[in-house]
Amino acid sequence: MKLTFYGHACFSVEIGGKSILFDPFITPNEKASSIDISTINPDYILITHGHEDHVADAITIAKQSGAKVVSNYEIVTWFGSNGVENGHPMNHGGSWSFDFGRVKYVTAIHSSVMPDGTYGGNPGGFIIESDEGSFYYAGDTALTYDMKLIPESTKLDFAVLPIGDNFTMGIDDAIKAADFIQCNKIVGVHYDTFGFIEIDHEAANNKFSNGGKELILLEIGETKNI
Ligand code: NI
Ligand code: MN
């Protein structure tokens, strides 16, 4: 699987020739000014929750690419009322097989409201299972015991976890989350974008390696085979 990081908690993964974009927040992110969103044409856009820092560019990219938007029912309905008709609504605990693999929408402990104040359902994360491998994107969340359920059904090759603290898990809880999900290869997101979530990269890397885990912090625009 090929993962490209677009800053904050936005990334894409290529599986089976399909491109899946997660939580697009690029044009409002000064740190991601090198990214031209007109070049991003995914087949799917997966949205964990309704906050601005996860949906800011989603309507634009959905319209230019024709990508299918996958999220909870309330968020997919909101996209529909904003002219994005190609949507697939889900809710917690549900799975669906798409042409690249199977997607499950799982619990996140956070909040969810759309940028215009519309109710955004309850926040979630995604488990993706495919012929090329499986991964978990937690979305914005606290550490939760529900994560322990994930390895009972899915052997993860990597996971994308928030590590910036304040609004989500910080480093220490992300290490516990890696234990809960039985996955030692963690891509960190949701850090450094703004003041409340700045982290010390070296300290973070040391804590993960002391815990026997790998923390991957990508440059914005960087692509990694994973
Ligand atoms: Ni959020
Ligand atoms: Mn967020």
Image (spheres, grey):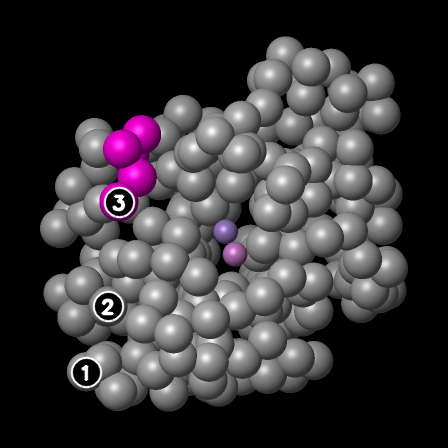
Instruction: Determine crowd level at label 1: few under 14, some 14-19, many 20+ residues with C-alpha closer than 10 A.
Output: few
Sequence order check: which comes first, mark 3 or mark 2? 3
Q: Residue 110's quadrant in the figure?
A: bottom right
Q: Which residue is mark 3?
A: 28
Magenta region, residue range: 28-32
Q: Secondary structure at mark 3?
A: loop
Residue 2 to residue 53: above or below = above
Pointer 2 with pointer 1, Cβ within 8 A: yes
Residue 202 against residue 76 in the figure, above or below = above
Which residue is identified by label 1?
83
Q: Give the residue type at disc 2.
A: Ile
* Residue type marked 3: Pro
Q: Secondary structure at mark 2?
A: helix
In primary-sequence order, the first of circles 2 and 1 is: 2
**Mark 2 — residue?**
59
Quadrant location of residue 86? bottom left
Residue under the image location 59 percent in, 83 percent down: 91
The amino acid type, in three-letter code, at marker 1 is Gly
Mark 1 to mark 3: distance in Å? 21 Å
In the image, taking residue 204 as reference, residue 164 lies left or right, namely left
